[in-house]
Image (cartoon, rainbow, N blue to C red):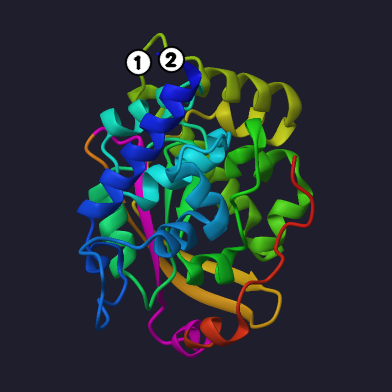
Amino acid sequence: MARTDKLAELGAFLRSRRDRIRPADVGLPHGPRRRVPGLRRDEVAVLAGASVEYYTELERGAGAQPSEQMLAALARALRLTADERDHLYHLADRPVPVQGGPASHVHPGMLDLLDRLQTTPAQVITDLHVTLVQNPLAVALLGDQSGYRGRSASFVHRWFTDPEARALYPAEDHETQSRSFTADLRAAAARRDANDTEAADLIRELSAGSPEFARLWAEHEVGFRRDDRKRIVHPSLGLIEVNCLNLFSEDGRQRLLWFTPAVGTDGAAKLDLLSVVGVQAMAPDRA
C-alpha cells in the first residue's frame, strides 16, 4: 500500500473508531444537541493530549506523521483492542511496541475502570512498574510519569538509581520500600517467559549499578504488592497516608492501582484537596 493510501486509511480508521464510542464510555457527559452519536474530534484530541488541529489533520490523511507516543495515546483514547492497536501502528508505518514499555497496550476494560475512578487517584502500571496511564488525581498525587523513556520508565529502576525518586516516601520508609520493590520484581520476573529479556536486563543492570539492590536480591525474598499502606510525601500537602490497592490483569503483566485514605488519618481531607492543589512537579528531570 502506498504511503498516501496508508495515511488516508489511517484517517478513515480513526474516524470509524471514534464514531463507535459514546461519551459515557470514556467518562464524558453526553450533553445536549450532539450532532454525532460518537465522540467529536475535539473530544478525542483532549483524551489523547493532542491539539484539535493536529488530530483533524490525522483524520484527513493530510500528511501528519504521528509519533509512537501519540499512537499509544490514540489507541487508549479510542479504546482499541490489541489487534486494532497493531493495525494503527502498521498504517502509520511505526513499529508495534513490545509489551512492557510506556507505549504498551492497555486493555480497554482496565481503562474503563480507570475512567470510573474519578474521585480517587488511580493509574495503570506494568509488572515492572512502568506507568502506562494516570488519571488527573494520580498525577496530582504522584507527579506526571508520562515523560520517562527507556529503562528509567520503570519506577523500580529509578528507585535504585535516582535519589530524587525516593523523595516520594519518607526516609524512614525507604528500606521497607526497597525490600518490597525487590520482592515484587522477583515474583514478576519468575512469571515471565524464560526467553523474556526485559525483566532479566533490568535485574542485571540494577545488580551491577546498585549495591543495595544486589544485597536485597541475594536474599531471595518474593512477594507481589497486592495491597500496601503507604506514606507519600506531597510537595504541597505534606505527608499523606493511603492504602494502595491492586487489580491485576489476567496475565499479571499490568495492574490497576488506586489509592484510598488510610483509616484514622487525615488522608481523606488531603486527598480531597488534590483536585484543588492540582498537578505538582514531582520529578524535574527525565531521561
Residue at (20, 52) in percent of width and height: 20
Q: Are marks 2 and 1 in contact (CB under 8 Å)?
A: yes
Residue at (21, 37) in percent of width and height: 250
In-front residue for pair 264/24: 24
Q: Amino acid at mark 2?
A: Asp
* Image spot of residue 145 (x, y percent): 60, 53
Magenta span: 251-271
* Count of marks, rendered view: 2
In-front residue for pair 267/286: 286
Question: Horizontal placement of 11 versus 213: left or right?
Answer: left
SS for tag 2? loop
Question: Horizontal placement of 16 versus 185: left or right?
Answer: left
Circle on res. 223: none
In the picture of the structure, the residue carrying the numbered disc 2 is 196
Q: Amino acid at mark 1?
A: Asp
* Image spot of residue 25 (x, y percent): 23, 62
* Image spot of residue 102 (x, y percent): 52, 39
* Image spot of residue 150 (x, y percent): 64, 31
Would residue 26 be visible to someone looking at this image? yes
Would residue 79 be visible to someone looking at this image? no
Above-or-below relation of 207 to 32: above
In the picture of the structure, the residue carrying the numbered disc 1 is 193
Residue at (74, 46) in percent of width and height: 286
Residue at (57, 71) in percent of width and height: 140
Question: Horizontal placement of 101 versus 126: left or right?
Answer: right
